[in-house]
Image (cartoon, rainbow, N blue to C red):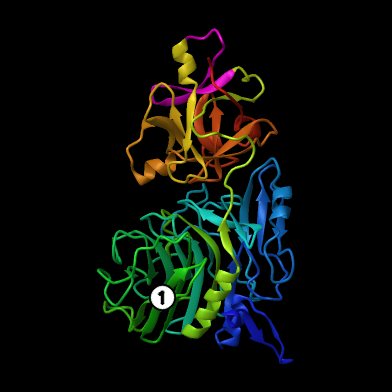
Amino acid sequence: MLHYALMLVGTGSLVAAGPCDLYANGGTPCIAAHSTTRALYNSFSGALYQVKRGSDNTTTNISPLSAGGVANAGAQDTFCARTTCLISIIYDQSGRGNHLTQAPPGGFKGPEANGYDNLASAIGAPVTLNGQKAYGVFSPPGTGYRNNAVSGSAKGDQAEGMYAVLDGTHYNSGCCYDYGNAETNSLDTGNGHMEAIYFGDSTYWGSGTGSGPWLMADLENGLFTGRNPKNNPAPSISYRFFTTILKGGPNLWALRGGNAASGTLSTYFSGARPTPSGYNPMSKEGAIIFGIGGDNSVSAQGTFYEGVVTSGYPSDATENAVQANIVAAGYATASLTSGDSFTVGSSISLRATTSGYTDRYLAHTGATVNTQVVSSSSATSLKQQAMWTVRAGLANSGCVSFESRDQPGSFIRHYDFVLKVNANDGSKAFREDATFCPQAGLNGQGSSIRAWGYPTRWIRHFDNVGYVGSNGGVKTFDNARAFGDDVSFVVGSGFA
């Protein structure tokens, strides 16, 4: 299928083509192209995204290593060394300026003090593309980007297409992990006012077969996989990298998808608009959202690598060519950890590095995680409260979980961002809350341990209590003062 990765230019010669080159060649050009992993045009060499550094709030742009190439992850790593970074802008590569920035408050208020949504961590979704490191956008609940003044987007019943490459294993049932066309006022303005890719396992508005997650179309007040909201043949998805496609025009729409790492697309639905009122004709408004619902509903989670929105209804042949290009990009997983080795099965201690607290270790009293002064002469019971058995991450085996030494079967987990020691109840939520990804210590000592499901948040001691804190934020324990010290721990082999 090499011909899918090439296109004919004016000179009659064949050159490598990016997804948006292929869409343009098919007569349905991109009006927005977003990716933190690579250029989506063969000739694009501009900024892909912007990161903001936690230590001084300065920003830098990350561009491809070369025109049409993979993002320069090394430039990000250098800029963000020994501090935290957020993705502050996802730039539009189409030339129309349809950039995605921090979503403002809407029908649902965002989690920030001013009602805006959170920004994503710059390191939450490392991947490789044909062996070259890059970063996707890992979005916990409360994270969202938006542009309410888009140039060239479909409105009313006009035709459009869109695709997104997502992590098919990162999802929940919240509303709504979307990418696509939405309301321009961040409110729910009625049926048919959206046309966006949705991914998750919500069954409130619609569903497919099995237990999910599913690719569905968020058309506002309904998630659709066919003409009716429920019991449609869209399959449950388990691909690690998942190509999602939605397109719609006058009384016609389609959902397609496939493994973004190999193979071709399948058509899950193609036909007339849904039967409930308000969806034929459509009343699209033309904003672009990412990670949230049209009214800024912010309870969903997911991971995004690249996506576009087009003008016009793309042909299956064009989409097949784009899928071949995505497969040829060579998406693969990358290490989620760095720094000290956390050997599964070993017993460890975690000693604080903050000045004045270096005799304290992360421990627990009952369900409360705290720091306590522990020494070789301490009681055996206290030593065991400050020892943890390293287990493979309950939600992601690329990270780790910490089992209590004195309460086997109980693990450190965060709940409302407070650390607890609770018995494993086997739920998806518990597994995610109990999974952590160690990194090299932010203050240059030992390890800093970020929450897998909330990668802007790190295990932190604050007033001798354990939290998952962010480097600045609305919580008291998000205070940026001494953050790098408070989240850095020297890893020991436990106590005798």
> Is residue 384 depicted above or below 391 in this figure?
above
Secondary structure state at the residue bearing disc 1: strand
Q: Residue at x 69, y 88 (%)?
A: 9
Q: Position of residue 56 (x, y in %)?
A: 71, 44
Which contiguous range is marked in magenta? 360-379
Q: Is residue 151 left or right of residue 412?
A: right
Residue type, mark 1 in image: Ser
Residue 352 part of the magenta segment: no
Query: Which residue is farthest top?
Result: 377
Using the rendered image of the protein, determine whether residue 481 is visible from the camera's viewpoint.
no
Q: Disc 1 marks which residue?
A: 266
Q: Residues within 10 Å of mark 1 (few under 14, many from 20)?
A: few
Location of residue 479 by image quarter? top right
Q: Residue at x 41, y 75 (%)?
A: 266
Q: Quadrant of the N terminus?
A: bottom right
Location of residue 187 by image quarter? bottom left
> Is residue 327 depicted above or below 125 in this figure?
below
Q: Is residue 211 left or right of residue 296?
A: left
Residue 375 part of the magenta segment: yes
> Is residue 209 depicted above or below 352 in this figure?
below
Dominant secondary-structure state across the stretch colored magenta? strand
State the residue in front, 91 or 281: 91
State the residue in front, 164 or 129: 129
Q: Residue at x 58, y 74 (%)?
A: 325
Q: Position of residue 234 (x, y in %)?
A: 33, 70
